[in-house]
Amino acid sequence: MSKSTAQEKQKTSDAAAGDAPPAQQQREDISAETNRRIVETISIVAGMHGSEKAAVLLLALGEEAKPIWNRLEDDELREISSAMSNLGAVRAETVEYLIKDFTNRLSGSGAVTGSYEQTNRLLLSFLPPDKVDALMEELRGPAGRTMWDKIANVNEQLLANYLKNEYPQTVSVILSKIKTEHSARVLTALPPEFALDVIQRMLRMEPVQREILEKIETTLRNEFMTNLARTSKRDSHEQMASIFNNFDRQTEGRFMSLLEENDKDAADKIRSLMFVFEDLSKLDPGGVQTLLRNIDKNKLGLALKGANDEMRNLFMSNMSERAAKLMREEMAAMGPVKLKTVEAAQQEMVVVAKALADRGEIMLAQSGGQDELIY
């Protein structure tokens, strides 16, 4: 072998050796990311209630789940329907983990989204309309898995107006079962003498028998919650704020400008009730990290590309240094992006944030000053 040939082989060998570490590092990074996502999915599943897991399975199966629905008892049907209507967005990894036997079939369909409308449509496909109406009417009431959770989400003035006509002993039991801060607001709204009587009974209260609790729950469900679902109407400004939240930016700006010219007070109130992308800047670090775990990374890059420096820094600072660097590189590589595409990605982040807030996983502060978070 000539000297020149030996030198060329040595250079080729050195080059191959030099290429190995980056390739190995890449494999390690991929493996670490895969393990992280597996651990994250296991953690999410571990935190899910049984009825939520069942709701994901039935949503994924769609109308093919009809034989399963037909075998459910009324209580099971009510609990799963409630979980389904409050489910929100579920990541594809979580769906696949929960129903491993159907992974291949689900891989094309990806994630599922549980909503009030989806639940109603699915139930109507195999249950009598009157039974569906009764179930959905109950779901239209305040959110919550149990009756006490639902009561805790009822406006204090509405609840006080109902309780002031009940026996003080019954009221004392009800207020002892809900969160103390909500009990305080309800007591404040009750007539002073009646409230004092309730407080004294709460102080002397002994453990309540299960049969009595069940009777009170049944009365609340049949009398109070049913009437509340039938008669309660959303505030018109709140409803309009929800409509404005679903406009694209240009449409929202156009209608808001026209409204300001004709009724500035109404425009200000709607604006204060709206939750927009910029309001995500008020999330605490834990909330930002929770949102990051639940948002599609491609959508995140698009949304942040059109965000101000403060918003970008907020999300980047809650990523690992490597992830933040990759995100910046991806954003730079996107080149020019249509404003409509950016706004759609930002709106999707808002939708995911609202779903997380509804499940109690993060706390949102809206545009109005009263909801600002103080640390």
Image (cartoon, helix red, strand yellow):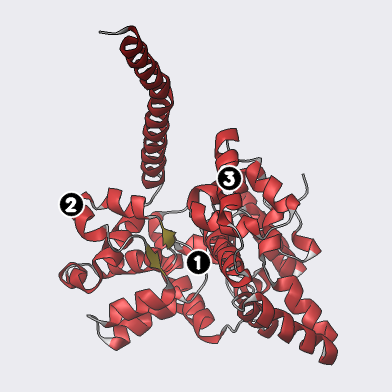
Question: Can you give x and y, in whole percent of width and height, for residue 38 in the image?
Answer: 36, 39
- Measured along the vertical axis of the image, is residue 341 above or below residue 318? below
Q: Secondary structure at mark 3?
A: helix
Packing grade of label 1 (10 A; few <14, some 14-19, many >=20) is many
Question: Can you give x and y, in whole percent of width and height, for residue 95 in the image?
Answer: 32, 55
Identify the residue at horizontal 72%, vertical 61% (top origin).
196
- Does the image show residue 238? yes
Label at residue 101: 2
Label at residue 329: 3
Q: Earlier in the sequence, mark 3 or mark 1?
A: 1
Question: Can you give x and y, in whole percent of width and height, for residue 159 in the image?
Answer: 61, 72
Q: Is residue 233 left or right of residue 150?
A: right
Q: Amino acid at mark 2?
A: Asp
Q: Amino acid at mark 3?
A: Glu
For marks 3 and 1, give the one nearer the viewer: 3
- Measured along the vertical axis of the image, is residue 7 above or below residue 321? above
Identify the residue at horizontal 74%, vertical 60% (top origin).
371
Q: Amino acid at mark 1?
A: Ala
- Measured along the vertical axis of the image, is residue 62 above or below residue 98? below
Identify the residue at horizontal 82%, vertical 89% (top origin).
263
Q: Which residue is mark 1?
A: 143
Quadrant where the N terminus is found in the figure: top left
Give 181 or 298, whichever is nearer the viewer.
Answer: 298
Packing grade of label 3 (10 A; few <14, some 14-19, many >=20) is few
Q: Secondary structure at mark 1?
A: loop
Give 104 or 273, whichever is nearer the viewer.
Answer: 104
Q: CA distance from mark 3 to mark 1?
A: 42 Å
Q: CA distance from mark 3 to mark 2?
A: 38 Å
